[in-house]
Amino acid sequence: MSGKCFSTDVFARWMDGDLDDRALLLELIAHLAWCCEDCRRAWREAARSRVPGRGLLAEWHHSATIEGVCGTDAVDQARERVLKVREEVFSVEAARAPKLLQSLLAFPVQEQVGVVQRTRTKYVSLALAQLLLESAHKVRVCDPRESKRLAALAREVVKKGQSDRVARAFGKDLLGTAKALEGNASRLFGEYREAEACFDSAHRILETGSGDPIVFAELLSYRVSLLLDQVQLDQAKVVAGQAISIFQKAGEDHQAGTVLIKKGLIEAGLGVPAQAVKSLGKALELLDAERDPQMVLITHKNLALYIGEAGDPARGLEVLEKYRSEEHTPERIQIFHTWIEGKMRAKLGEYEVATAALESVRNLFAEQGDAPNAAAATLDLALIHAKAGQLEAVQRVALEALPLLLPLDIPDAALAPLILLEETARAQAVTVTLLQRLQRKLAEPLIWRKGEQVN
């Protein structure tokens, strides 16, 4: 039996699940079985660092869980301590990270993961992973696929390994954030089961991280979006309140503002658009336009929508026009602008402008492979025609729906209402009531969950 002893770092890697050397692991277990006193001391030291409140946040007496984070009044102090340690960990790598990012992204997209995996040390950089995640976050709305790809690439960078326990804790934060971003991208394409799995995985990963309250709040914010899509509004309201509380206690007003936007969406879903207008107004007071101009732009567009829904479409259109998208604005945001404008124009009786806008929106969503929004725009368009008494146009839109949406590989549960729409159109029996019923059905998130049966 070898007399070799093991360091605290080896035990820490074992506890974190990062000890991939099977031979070393077997040797370690065998060594412990011989009751080595030195290794028992190293084990206890490593274990003590993982007792809630005794890791990176030594004076923060709550465990690194969402429940612990939400329950503490010391979020700002906890955040300050994490940032101080984080700066020490990232400072060495920060200077070279932009060049590493440029080098990595210069490879063809399909080769980037393989480059990271094959390279021994060049891309071992938490700062690089952080830059990738920042890029993924920026495009999370306008290009969810690219956001998901960049987040997955960041995970590969983090998986290259870190040299000490503290760096590994921040690596876990980055892994959890990457998983959350991947889940958010899945949510945007109606893959709710995958989104839930990603968020659950992110939660477990973050519980082994630094305990930074902000990364937990960010995960809560993504969960709010999923709950909104699932129309679980009461639960969404609770989770939104938790996220807003953490962000505000930590002094992160901008991020608190982003969740206030979602609070407005919840209130609109609960049938109180006037309250939603108030929440969005508060959000705009907190948002940093330089930090996230797209978010501010989107918020103004939602504000315009809910002003219209609250009974003043003319003012809603005025707000929308004041913040009209520029040429450089991502296409997805421009599409939503056109969608909202079409709805406002319809409320004002501008039939031709409204239908042209909604037809464009429907086609663009279909081109992007966004089946839920393409279907929603189809029903909006059909309803505008129906309310204007244009029955031939209603029939045309209804008969176009299946050919347009079938190539998008939509789930069977979502296919059924569209088949009904086509059959009633062929029988010339489409009514406003039927369209409204189908609209509500297609707005149910569960029917877009692939691989599930919906009764």
Image: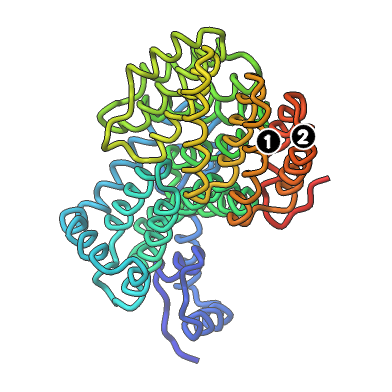
- Residue 131: image x %, image y %? 29, 52
Inspect this view and state whether residue 378 appears. yes
Quarter of the rendering containing residue 268: top right
Give the mark, 2 or 1, whose residue is nearer the N terminus: 1
Instruction: Left or right? Give the position of 145 relative to 378.
Output: left
Which residue is farthest front? Answer: 392
Quadrant of the drawing holding the C terminus:
top right
Image point 34% across, 58% down: which residue? 167
Image point 59% across, 57% down: which residue? 407
Q: Amino acid at mark 2?
A: Gln
Q: Which mark is residue 230?
A: none
Image point 42% across, 23% down: which residue? 301
Image point 55% across, 36% down: which residue? 225
Label 2 crowding class (10 Å Cα cut-off): few <14, some 14-19, many 20+?
few
Q: Nearer the viewer, residue 221 or 297?
A: 297
Which residue is farthest right? Answer: 455
The vertical placement of 161 against 441, above or below, is below
The vertical placement of 137 against 385, above or below, is below
Q: Are marks 2 and 1 in contact (CB under 8 Å)?
A: yes
Q: Nearer the viewer, residue 426 or 4?
A: 426
Which residue is under mark 2? 428
Is label 2 in a helix, a strand or a loop? loop
Q: Amino acid at mark 1?
A: Gln
Is label 1 in a helix, a strand or a loop? helix
Disc 2/disc 1 C-alpha distance (Å) = 7 Å
Which residue is under mark 1? 395
